[in-house]
Every structure is written in C-alpha cells, then in structure tokens.
Image (tube, helix red, strand yellow):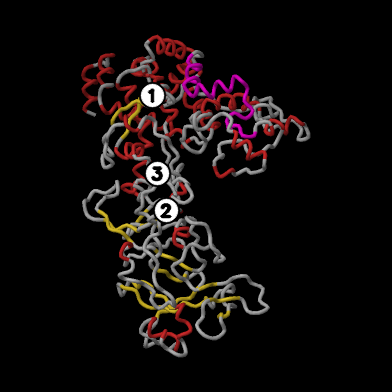
Amino acid sequence: MEEYKAFQAKGSVTAEDVRAMMKDESFYARMRNYHRALLRSNINSSVQGNGDYRVSGTPLSFAGNNSNNLRGGQSQRCDGEIAQDSCKANPQDPHQDNSTAPACRDAQGIPLPVSYDYDTNFYQCRQLDVASTAPELKFADCNALKADATYGKYVNFCDNRFLASAGKSVGYLCLPDPNKNTTNVLVASPATGTITEWVQPAGGTGTLTLKRCGFDIKTDVNNRPTRDGVWATQRGCVQREGYVTTTVQPFWSTTTETVKVCAVEAQDRAANPYTGESCETPRFNSDRSCGCGDKMRRCEIADVHTARVAAFNEEPLYITDSVVRNDEPYFNILTTRGSFVNGPLAEFYKQRQGVGVFSIKSPADAATLPAVTYANATEWTSYVRDNTHSGVLTTPAFLYRFPTQRARVNHFYEAFLCKHFAPAADANLPSPDDICNRSNNLATRCGCNYCHATIEPTGAHWGRYAERSALFLSPDQFPRLDVKCRDCAINGDTNCGGECSQYVMQAFDGDGANSLGLLKTYLYRSPAEEKNIEGGPQALVERMMETGDLERCTVKRVWNEFLGRAMTAEEQRMYLQTLSQDFAKNNHSLKGLIEQVVMSDAYRRID
C-alpha cells in the first residue's frame, strides 16, 4: 500500500519506474511462480518409490519387499544382537541338532546367516513359559525342552526370537500354523524320534513341505543346491546375518557417531563376485553381495527422497530465473546448457546415487560438477551440462512430469506455442473394418492421424530420452540397432537377460518384424524423423523460432499474467502483432515485453 500511495502522489508511473520494479526480488519471485505453473514443475506424484531402496532402524537395514530375497521374509531385518565378524562368540539357536554355526562370511567375504527365525506366515510361534498351561510350552528355554523325553522331539522347531519387552532373545516353539489350511494338514517326519520336517500325510493332495530351519542359504525353495552366489532362502525360514559397526557416516548424516548397519547393507561391491551381475542397477537391493555402497550412496532414507524431488522441482525455475534476471534472450530457457545444482543434486550426480528409483544420467562429467555438500539444500551453484541438453526441456522435472514422448510434445505445444491437439470439427472416424483403422503407426492410422501426424514426428526430438524416466540413451551405449537384442528377439527370447527393454523385441506387424533389435524410438520413423531424434529438443526450438509462434504465444501468456485474463479478439488485432515483432527485435527480452504490456493503454485502463 505504501508503494501504491507513493505512485498515486507522484501522479504517474514511468517506464523507468517499471524497470526499477523489475529489479526487485519480489518480481523475480513472481516470475519463478509464473514458470512453475507454466512448466507444471512438480514431480511429487510422478516419481514413486516402493521404499525397497530405503534403510531405517538400528541397525540400519532395508525393510521392504527386497527382504524376501535377502533374508526370506518381507520387512525382515538382520540380527541386531550379533556382530557379524564375531558370530561364533555369541551363537544363536544352539538347540538345533548339528547347529555349529558356519563361517561368518563366505570365501568372497559376503555375510552368511548367524541366526534364523521361523516365518510366521507358515508357523505359529508361542513363547516358552514354565507357568504355561500348555505342556509343550512349560520350559524355561529351548535347552530345557530339548532335554525332555516327551517334547524333546520338537527341538528343531524351538526358536530363539528377540522379545522387545525383555530386551533379549527368548525361546518360542514354532509349529505349522493350525489356523491355515495349507499348514494344518502337515504331519511330523519322521513319525517317531526328533522331527526334521513337516510333510503332507499319506494320500494328501498338497505339495507343501517345511524343513527345519538352519544357516544354509545356498538352496532353493525345494532345498536343492544352487550355484555359488545365488542365494535362495529356505521356505518358511528367515535367515539373518549380523551387524557391523562403522565410523563412516551415511552421506545424509549430520553427526560423527558410530553407526550400526546390517552386514548385507554395509557392503560396497560394484558387482556380484560370483555371477558378475552389476550392483549399480536397481537389482542391488535384492543381491546379498552388493550392499548400499560407500557412505551408503546406493540407499537412502525418506528425507533423502523428499529432498531430491524438491530439488528436481526447483531446477527449471533456477534456469528460467537466471535467463530473466540477466535479461538474456527469453527462449534461452529452452536451449541453454546452463543449469544449477544444490547439495542433494550434486551428491546425487557425483556419487551415482538413487539407482533404486531414479533413472538419470549425470548431465555433465561428475568431476566438473560443483562440490556442494548434501546438507546444503539451499545453496544453488551454476554449471554447464553436456551438449545433449536443451534448457528446461531436458531437466528431470520436465521429463518425469511428462513421461512419454507424446506428453512432452503436448505440453511443449500448450505452454510455448499456445496450441492444442484436437481433430478438426469435420473430422470423421473410418469404419472399424477399414484396414487403415488397424495401422499400428498412429501417424498414419485413420482417425488418429489428425493429431498424431504432428505428434509422432515432433516427439522424435525426445527420442534419445527414455520414456518414464530421465535417462539419456547415449548412442555408444544404446545404438540404433543392437545385434544381440535382434538375435534374442528372432529366437523368441524377449527378455534377453534384461538388457533390451529399450529395443523392439516383438513384432506386431510387418514393420515390427523388420525392426527387431531396433531402438524403440526408431520404429516407424522416416529419414526426416530420424534427424529429429539426433537433433534433440534444440532442433525443435530452432525450427519453431522461424514460425513466430513462440513469440506470439509468449505475448499472450504475459498478457494473461499481468492483466489477469486472456487477450480478446479485438486486443489480438490491436496489440499481438506489434508486441510480438517488438519482442523479437528487442532480442526476446522478457523484461522489455512486460514493460510494453504494463505501459499499454489496455493495461492502464484495466477495471
């Protein structure tokens, strides 16, 4: 109000006054909000992780679905009472026959189980208590049960389990759950003596067999040996490794205290030493040999994901702010290689973090990225991305928010060309029996081609960016034609070791049959469209600069922003052409355009 009253007293607002206003931080804050809305820069609901890559608790541990592969049960953690490398000094479950614990680690140093629990998805586990009314439970511990002439037969299924209220492990008797129809029919085997397994009764129709739990995890679900390095936990058993204590802090930590970490998660390997499978992919959190890496860089906590998403949301706004603040040509926001990182993003790129949820290649050589520590979420530093990048159009925020080539084209047209895809008013759909209606190429399919004849070739400009991710498909790693993928597809192996997800592996028409092993983005492409793929979004912007549509759309959007409504048809006739031409002549200065708009008669007589 003070500002308003000052200008009221002055009697007029000059161009110099407007320019002074556009140097104020409140103006730049408004422009950031303007571009946030224009770009819909918010991927909070676009990137979801199921939590399998997160660690929590003490010791730090995975606690999601991946625990099924690592330990034999969902959300199962390691044994927090036993130090992994001192596993023989404090053995667990000594009641089991032949229960000598194996080595603490295998020949490659991979942690082996140091204790086990019976899985309550299969077993009913009841605590031993000398005051119990159930005779099979009236024992102080598993050793006392083992010594009993009547109930000693259950010794292999007496389980030392951690009891939080007692702060220690106590004995439980775990027998097949009588409340489930899959386990209540099982009978003891052998019928006399110490029981080693539970099997279907004679004449039974089920196939479930539950063997006693132990330390050996080199078996599959049917208790058959598997090759070294491929650990299959035993059905009905949770097989836990111990913990390690380290002074190396996780990258998100703000303390210097020692940290307890489950021994599997504490590892740092680039690949499984037995199979050679990479640990630098999302599979790392289900392989017992991988671990979270140096400073737990492959893992994170909930706050880390929140910080990364917030940083990705802000990056395009720092790009646009820099262009507007420095009065650069406005459409640099669509072409510049310059960008910014804060602490979470710098750590993310430099340390190759987030392999479990984000599929993003570092935008520049990691060695050239600004050294901003993870904790500095508010410190943004400029840097130059490699030549594959094009302003806000290749930021993770844009690529994740608009996850397909078609979505990216659609928003580019809406935001920067003020155009919308819709069939003509007199458009007609062909008969369902028309062969043209069955074309897999939407650019030529009758009825669809009204829009897709433009969408498909334009979408090719993002052809080197994977869909539903922000990964750049570099030609050296993802060639136009992959011979291995082609050969797999011809032989009917559509998986091909999981290496060909970006390639055409199935044929649904003649073009598809001739395109097996081709990078998907090249399917149905003409030579001109293939040039669009290699030109990237930069080539699209350059072509649109020649039409004048970018200037006209920007004028309309600035008008709407400052007058609070769209241009009327009469105002378009009076102002649009002049403002667009002046905008172009003035080196596409957004500040200059805003000045013209707010100094116009239409703005000054606004009701």
Residue depth check, mark 3 versus mark 1: number of the one nearer the observer: 3
Residue at x-position 44% and y-position 87%: 134
- Quarter the C terminus occupies: top left
- Residue for badge 1: 337
Image coordinates of residue 494 in percent, x first then y, are 62, 43
* 399 vs 360, nearest the viewer: 360
**Range of the magenta residues?**
516-545
Q: As shown in the figure, which amino acid type bears the numbered disc 1? A: Arg
SS of the residue at dot 1? loop
Whole-Å distance between the Cαs marked 3 and 2? Answer: 18 Å
* 375 vs 202, nearest the viewer: 202
419 shown above or below 123: above
- Residue for badge 2: 289
Q: Quadrant of residue 390?
A: top left
Task: Count every numbered label the image shows and give the total.
Answer: 3
- Residue for badge 3: 354
Whole-Å distance between the Cαs marked 2 and 1? Answer: 39 Å
Q: As shown in the figure, which amino acid type bears the numbered disc 3? A: Gly
SS of the residue at dot 3? loop
SS of the residue at dot 2? loop
Image coordinates of residue 558 in percent, x first then y, are 40, 22
Classify mark 2: residues with Cα within 10 Å, few (<14), some (14-19) or many (20+): many
Residue depth check, mark 2 versus mark 1: number of the one nearer the observer: 2
Query: Which of the two labelled residues, at mark 3 and mark 1, occupies the earlier sequence position?
Result: 1
**60 on left or right of 487:** left
- The residue positioned farthest toward the bottom in the image shown: 149
Q: Is residue 540 magenta?
A: yes
Q: Quadrant of residue 205?
A: bottom right
